Image (tube, grey):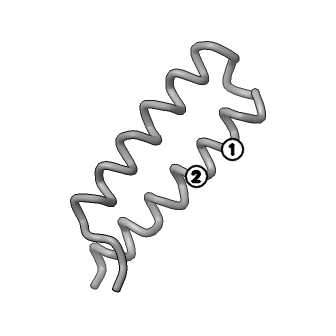
Amino acid sequence: MGIGLNTLLSKIEKTRSEMVELAHLYGYSNPNVVQCSQKLDSLLNVYYNFQEH
């Protein structure tokens, strides 16, 4: 079974906060920021798929 909605939302918020912090430190085009953004995109896709079912 997949992760629960509350866990997913926590991971989304944690990743979003991490991305914002990294962007402030290194700028938006830094590879670490881009990687974190991609991770956030993935989590959001899981969330949207979760909502559709």
**Residue 51 left/right relative to 31:** left
In the picture of the structure, the residue carrying the numbered disc 1 is: 35
Query: Which circle marks residue 46 in the picture?
Result: none
The residue most toward the top is 25
- Where is residue 12? Give x, y as percent: 39, 49
Above or below, 30 against 7 in this view is above
Instruction: Say what amino acid the circle numbered 1 marks.
Output: Gln
Tag 2: Cα neighbours inside 10 Å, few (<14), some, or many (≥20)? some
Relative image position of residue 4 (x, y in whole percent): 26, 70
Marks 1 and 2, how far apart at CA: 6 Å
Q: Is residue 13 above or below residue 28?
A: below
Q: Count neighbours of disc 1 (C-alpha within 10 A) and say few if under 14, some if 14 to 19, many if 20 or more.
A: few
User: What is the x, y in percent for residue 20?
Assistant: 50, 26
Left or right of 10 in this view: 27: right
Q: Is residue 52 above or below residue 30?
A: below
Quadrant for the N terminus in the image: bottom left
| Residue drawn at x 32%, y 75% as measured from the top left | 50
Q: Which mark is residue 39?
A: 2
User: In the shown orientation, is residue 43 left or right of residue 4?
Assistant: right
Report the side of 24 relative to 2 (left or right): right
* Quarter placement of the C terminus: bottom left
Secondary structure of residue under mark 1: helix
Q: Residue at x 67, y 25 (%)?
A: 28
Query: In percent of the image, x 28 and y 59: which residue is there?
Result: 7
- Assign a secondary structure to mark 2: helix
Q: How many marks?
A: 2
Q: Which of the 4 image quarters holds residue 33?
A: top right
Q: Amino acid at mark 2?
A: Lys
Q: Residue at x 39, y 76 (%)?
A: 49
Q: Are marks 1 and 2 in contact (CB under 8 Å)?
A: yes
- Report the residue that reaches farthest toward the left: 6
